[in-house]
Amino acid sequence: MNQFTFESKQKTVLFGFMGLGLVCLLLAYFTDEQPHHVRFWTNFLQNTVFFTGIAFITLFFSAASITAWAGWYTKFKRVMEAMSLFLIPGLALLAVIVAGLWLGWHDLYHWADAEEVAKDPILAGKAGFLNKGWYTLGTFIIVGVWIYFAMRLRSLSLAEDQNGGADFAHHRKMRIVSAAFLPIAGFSSAAIIWQWIMSLDAHWYSTLFAWYTGASWFVSAMAVLILMLIYLKSKGYFQGVYEDHLHDLAKFMFAISIFWTYLWFSQYMLIWYANIGEETVYFKTRMEKYPVLFYGNLVLNFLLPFFILMRNDTKRKYGSLVFVSIFVLLGHWLDMFQMVKPGALETALHAAGAHGDAHGHGSSFAAGFSIPGLIELGTMLGFAAFFVYMVFNSLGKAALEPANDPYLAESAHHHV
Amino acid sequence: MSMDNAQKEVLFGLYDDEEQLLDAVKRAKGDHLEIMDVYTPFPVHGLDPALGLEESRIHIAGFIYGALGTLTAFGFMTWVFTRDWPIIFGGKPYWSVPSFIPITFELTVLFSAIGMTVTFFTVCGLWPGVNNPVLDDRITDDKFCIAFQTNGQSNSEIDRLKSFFMETGASEVNTKVI
């Protein structure tokens, strides 16, 4: 089976989940007691950035693998291509947030409020970068460039299927395109992560925040890739992809989980040690008001993958792989949740003229703010279904196994 | 390998290619020939299962050493900074877990690395001054070697081994006493 058929049953299920996600988004919009529909907008932003980030990192992973002359992944590179093409719908979702920024639909970003900026020297000092123009340009230009590279790699890969020759001209071209993309990806992702996520806490900054978020996306992308491959294998596709390929993907998931923890700790310890109020406020808020997420984050994203994936055989068995992938994916989604919610909520309360804990979000848990409620889980499932739908859609448009790729034989005999 | 002082008579064949070597090893297993050892200049994929070697258990030892390192570092720092010699650094509590993490990490790595190295050398019987003869210098360069021990074997048995080497494509067959 070298051609993926997107069955109508799969579409029905995915549409069902997308419907659920839409209902949850609408519920969040209309039932929220908070000002400016902050629950809706934070959910929207969190999921949009999470899944767009997964698409971006998959593209980055493809480019890095091509540049490193790696061949082991060639058998399933069409799945990676299809995942990276989610950048296009991702940009459409981001466009909604950009539109909301100009039209005043939301109060996600403190720096977007001109009156606030005028009387706040810190925000005024950052206004050269944190302003609506840069946010808009950054989103469209940066994601646009990513999309260009994703489509370029995809079209070269498809052209190679048709008329790739013994001179491997297509692959050589892909190598140039990939090498050009890597530095662009490195700098541009950092800049746009600052705008999308870090600027929600507009007064606060951390120089390794972008790496931290990038590592989070990377682990999530590996988890998604593993889950997709296992699902597609169970449907009879990708019989040429076996434990050794999954083993290497799981090694990436394991290694980047540790890298993520390293970054988490580096960010935390330096701020804890220096003990400067303007820096510690980020962690103080999260440790006091979001303790379950704050400590659960380390359990789900470090202890769980570290101890389970440490062994050789757990990286090769479907059961343990599916288990870890699902939990790690959920863990990084929760991490994104606690990156987005506190800053945005504070901005919204501030904009509404409320101060402190007037709305009762001090010590008690509030679904949708200090912990995800059912609406948040439903929204996540909706976005996930949308992601899978778009990926399957792209997957069905080309042969599952590339032809004429110089590394195809190496991938077919991959041995760890 | 050289723990016993008795000299070994060794008959060994050299192959030019790892594919030939792998096929020969499989054939020897099929013919119930008892291979003394196989030498290759680099790791050959699939050789361990073909020889019937079990997976190494050194990583289990490594985990235990690492866990010991974690406990040593964390326990020691906890004792020093809460019981033995409490000092306030920068207004932090005595038991400041974040500042213990880097040293805990370092000792975990150090214990597991040194522990595994010592364990590996001990299991292999390697220590300074050990006699470890090499059958042929080229097995560290471009030759792949299968060795049989021939002490007390009859001429017909030795001939059988030699014909095995001929049939499996060895480029040279030599003997050596080590």
Image (spheres, helix red, strand yellow):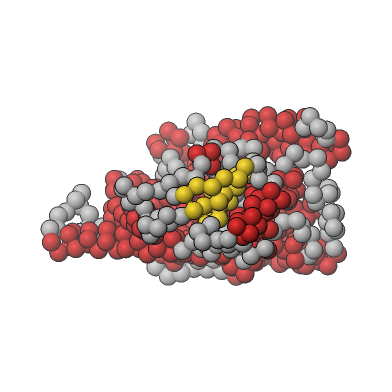
Q: Position of residue B71 (x, y in %)?
A: 30, 63
Q: How many marks?
A: 0
State the residue at coordinates (51%, 33%). A129
| Image x and y of residue A330, in percent | 57, 62
- Give the x, y percent position of residue B82: 17, 62
Front position in the image: A303 or A270 = A303
Q: Is residue A339 above or below residue A172?
A: below
Tell me where residue A142 appears, x and y as whole percent.
63, 36
Q: Left or right: where does residue A116 sit relative to residue A384?
A: left
Vertical position of residue A274 compared to residue A297: above or below: above
Front in this rendered view, residue A128 or A308: A308
Residue B10 appears anywhere in the view: yes
Q: Quadrant of the N terminus of chain B?
A: bottom left
The quarter of the picture where residue B111 lies is: bottom left
Instruction: Judge whether residue A41 can be spotted in this image.
Output: no
- Residue A284 sits in which quadrant? bottom left
Query: Where, by quadrant of the figure, is residue B120 drawn?
Result: bottom left
The residue under the point 31% across, 48% down is: B128
Give me the residue at 81% from left, 40% from top.
A404
In the shown orientation, is residue A230 left or right of residue B101?
Answer: right
